[in-house]
Each structure stands twice: as structure tokens, then as C-alpha cells.
Image (tube, helix red, strand yellow):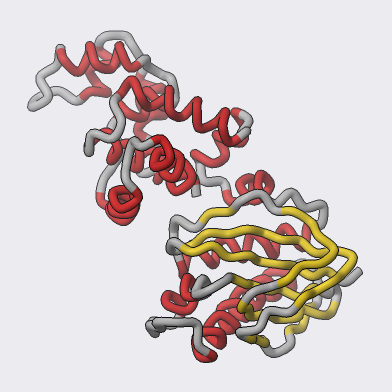
Amino acid sequence: MLNRLFGNYLVEKGKITLEALNALLAAKEEIKAGVEVIAIITKAMTPAAVKELSMNINKDSELFGEAAVDASIITDDKLDELLAYQSNAFMKFIQLLVDNGCLSYEDINHELDAFQQKSGFSDVQLNALIHDDVEQCVNIFVPLKSQNLKELTMTLVQTFRRIIDKDFYLEKAYTAHSIQLDKYACQTIAGDMHVRVYISAPGDGLLAIANYFTGDTYETVTDDALDSVGEFINCVNGVFATNMSYENTALDMNSPEYSAEGPFISNELLYVIPMHANGYNLRAVFEVYE
């Protein structure tokens, strides 16, 4: 989630183009983050110290981390801690930005600090995003009092990321009493909790789901595409209902519904969750019945 959020910030700053960002996000699984980059992000070493040590070692025969230990800059335990981050998605993304000349060592924390301030994230929140802690990430963007709705949101996020777009991300959710939806699919969950789950998007935004869920490709949002979105919601809710059954919460699901004509819905409690996937803007809406 943080890769796309920070990447969008860099696009806005003119540090990278959107096309280049998309290419880097698609490639990041192929590399490991270097100890140099990890040391800077975690502030185990300053950029100046990293550059100085890098210039004074034989890169063909010496590893940076071991050289930092030998120079008493970091301890063996700290090196082990840094090495554990090498497969972290955000660390790998920053490594790619450095490798492609988008960021220098000096830029990394400067831009991260500016991004954090602009986004209003606390140190704890930014750390949760770096570590990709799904529960804490949901708490940042969708602060819900209901544990059941929080579990539903986490299931939605995890399913999006697993099936639809690994760089899926959220914006701050909000509550409403009424809302006009665009093209949509929805499904009602009943039983020990009662909530109607919508996913809606203007124009062809629902292709973000339809073109990735079943393997079919649609040029526009047809009835078949909407049906695919409905089946995606059914998948999310099915996983959620199964998980809740282990907590002795009994849930049933109605058949999914969809339409190219979005309804105006009004309820005492609507949670609206702005989402982004595959270059499209979408909204999830939970219509909660007390």
C-alpha cells in the first residue's frame, strides 16, 4: 500500500513519471533491498556514512553490511536486523528508485519525511505502513469501532491485494447518511450482523476488478463485467463469513446484485471507503443495519 502512496507523492513532486512508477511497481518482486538503503531508512546510518563506507570498500570482495560491522558502525545484531528487511516490499521499492536514479541516498529520508508530513501520518502509522501491517493499515484509513466491520474491511483489502492489485491502496474513509452511487455491484450479509456491501465506480472504473478477477477482458463495463464484480464481492463476503463462523458468528449471504444505474441510498449509517486499484478510483460502501 505504501509503495503506491509514496510513489504517487513522488509523481506529484516530479521525481518520477507515472509510467515509470508503474513499471517499477511491476518489477519490484525481482530484487532484494541493499543494506545501504535499509540502513538509511531505518536511520541505523546516515546517508553520508553510507556513501563514505561505500567508497572505501572493494565491492567485488566485501559486503557492505560486514564492512559496516568491521568498522564498528553497526553491531552484528543490528546487521541481522537490517538483513531481515531485504524482502520488505517498501525497502525493495526504495532500492529500485535509487537504482534507477529517481532518488539519491540523501533524498530518501528527506522525501519520506516530507511525504509523512504531507500525509499526516504519525511515526507509528508510517512504521505500520512500512511493515505492511494490514490490521494497522486498515485502522489508519478506516477507523471502525465495530470489530466485525473491521474484519470485513481487512478481508476486503486482503482479497483485493491477493487477487486484483498487489499495490491496491485506500484513502481516508468517512461516514454518510446518504450517497449517490455510480455503476455498482452489491451483496447483503444477514444473520448475526446485517450489512449491505457495495462496490461502485464511475465510468469504466469497475474494470479494475472485472478485468482481473476471472481472466476475462472487457472494454467497457457490461452486464457480464458487473456480474464479475458481484462474484468478487461474493468471494470477499464468503471468506469473511467463514472466518466469522470460527468466532461463533452465523452469517448468510443473499445473491449478488448489480446495475449500470447506481441508486441513491439513504441510511442512518453508511461507511464510504475510497479505494484505488489498477489505475481506477472505486468506492466500497457498507450500509449497516443496526
User: Which one is in front, 93 or 33?
Assistant: 93
- Indicate whether 66 appears above or below 91: above
Whether residue 246 is visible, yes or no, is no
Q: In which quarter of the image is residue 136?
A: top right
Q: Which residue is drawn at 87% across and 70% down?
A: 267
Whether residue 154 is visible, yes or no, is yes
Q: Is residue 144 left or right of residue 223?
A: right
Q: Which residue is drawn at 37% across and 23% down?
A: 40
User: Which one is in front, 49 or 282?
Assistant: 282
Q: Which residue is drawn at 64% across and 74% down?
A: 182
Residue lying at the far top in this picture: please name it.
72
User: Which one is in front, 243 or 199?
Assistant: 199
Quarter placement of the C terminus: bottom right
Q: Which residue is drawn at 67% across and 59% down?
A: 273
User: Which one is in front, 145 or 8?
Assistant: 8
- Indicate whether 163 appears above or below 79: below
Where in the figure is residue 52, as x and y percent of width and height? 22, 11
Q: Is residue 49 left or right of residue 242?
A: left
Q: Quadrant of residue 85?
A: top left
Where in the figure is residue 29, as x and y percent of width and height? 31, 52
Where in the figure is residue 149, as x and y percent of width and height? 76, 62
Where in the figure is residue 112, as x and y percent of width and height? 46, 29
Q: How many labels does the image show?
A: 0
